């Protein structure tokens, strides 16, 4: 059972996300529990103020520390103490999220996800209350809400009993650092393009070899930076041809 608490100033963004598809299934099966909290609930002033101008000047606003630390400590306890929850802040300054990190976090009992907005959050919140900063990629979003949903969705697929067929978790992209090759469904011919003959042959071993080879080629051509994207031999034991790089 994975418990996730989300702290955001836009709780409404999470509604449909939590009520559809695998995330909804996981919640109904009791392997995932997500609670979304409005940061403004931890303000004490009449205007429910969550932000303030940055010291030193400059554009934009910064999330002020008092409500954020109060929210995090209410949901996770104090850092260092007997805290069982891991507190994660989404920010471009964080370590890049990958499948290995997702799998590790999916095994945690309790995560508190902090979604920043504006120019960011007061640095002292990070020092006092955050365990880990995560980025979902080198592009600029307006808040941590989409990163939180990306992490929740990626973890959900790994929770026990969520995907009908556990095999589909391990053959999919990035397990073993391998991308997938192409997929086809009916019709056998579409706009003059036919499905590769081997996939319709009924020869399961030949299909498995073709898929492994296609995955290897896709990874080498598109993501040579992945572990399985470096030069490897094909299923027949032949070394890769230079020409393969220009094929796709
Ligand atoms: N992967 N953003 C967070 C505000 C902010 C800035 C600093 C805390 C600290 C992003 C990303 C991302 C934009 C979300 C800035 N909050 N987060 N936001 N890419 O671009 O995770």
Image: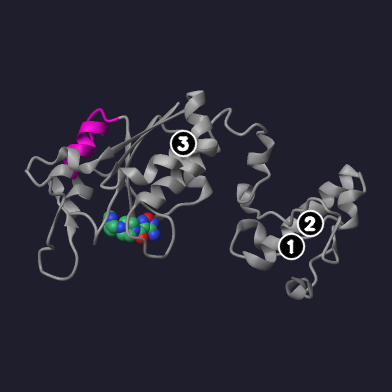
Q: Secondary structure at mark 1?
A: helix
Q: Quadrant of the C terminus?
A: bottom right
Tell me what residue is drawn at x 52 percent, y 24 percent.
Answer: 29
Task: Kindly check if marks 1 and 3 are in contact, taking CB atoms under 8 A apart as contact.
Answer: no
User: Which of the four quarters of the rendered structure image does ligand 1 lie in?
Assistant: bottom left
Tell me if residue 94 can be seen: no
Question: What label sits on residue 217 in the rendered view?
Answer: 1
Q: Give the extent of the magenta segment.
A: 68-83
Mark 2 burial class by Cα count in 10 Å: few <14, some 14-19, many 20+: some
Mark 3 burial class by Cα count in 10 Å: few <14, some 14-19, many 20+: few
Tell me what residue is drawn at x 67 percent, y 33 percent.
Answer: 165
Disc 2 target residue: 213
Question: What label sits on residue 19 in the rendered view?
Answer: 3
Q: Secondary structure at mark 3?
A: loop
Q: Is residue 52 magenta?
A: no
Q: Position of residue 162 (x, y in %)?
A: 57, 31
Give the side of residue 162 with respect to residue 180, left or right: left
User: Which circle's residue, 1 or 3, is located before the other in the chain?
Assistant: 3
């Amino acid at each position: 059972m994975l418990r996730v608490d989300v702290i955001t100033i836009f709780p409404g963004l999470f509604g449909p996300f939590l009520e559809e598809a695998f995330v909804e299934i996981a919640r109904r099966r009791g392997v995932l529990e997500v609670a979304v909290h409005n940061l403004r609930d931890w303000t004490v002033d009449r205007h429910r103020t969550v932000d303030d101008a940055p010291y030193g000047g400059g554009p934009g606003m910064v999330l002020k520390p008092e409500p954020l630390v109060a929210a995090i400590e209410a949901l996770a306890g104090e850092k260092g103490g007997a805290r069982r929850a891991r507190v994660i802040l989404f920010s471009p300054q964080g370590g890049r999220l990958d499948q290995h990190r997702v799998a590790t976090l999916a095994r945690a009992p309790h995560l508190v996800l902090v979604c920043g907005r504006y120019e960011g959050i007061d640095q002292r919140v990070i020092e006092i209350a955050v365990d880990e900063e995560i980025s979902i990629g080198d592009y600029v979003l307006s808040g941590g809400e989409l990163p939180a949903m990306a992490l929740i969705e990626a973890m959900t697929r790994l929770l026990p009993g969520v995907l009908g067929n556990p095999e589909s978790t391990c053959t999919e992209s990035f397990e073993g650092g391998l991308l997938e090759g192409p997929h086809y469904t009916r019709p056998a011919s579409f706009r003059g393009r036919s499905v590769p003959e081997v996939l319709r042959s009924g020869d399961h071993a030949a299909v498995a070899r073709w898929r492994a080879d296609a995955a290897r080629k896709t990874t080498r051509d598109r993501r040579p930076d992945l572990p399985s994207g470096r030069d490897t031999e094909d299923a027949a034991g032949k070394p890769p041809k230079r020409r393969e790089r220009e094929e796709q």
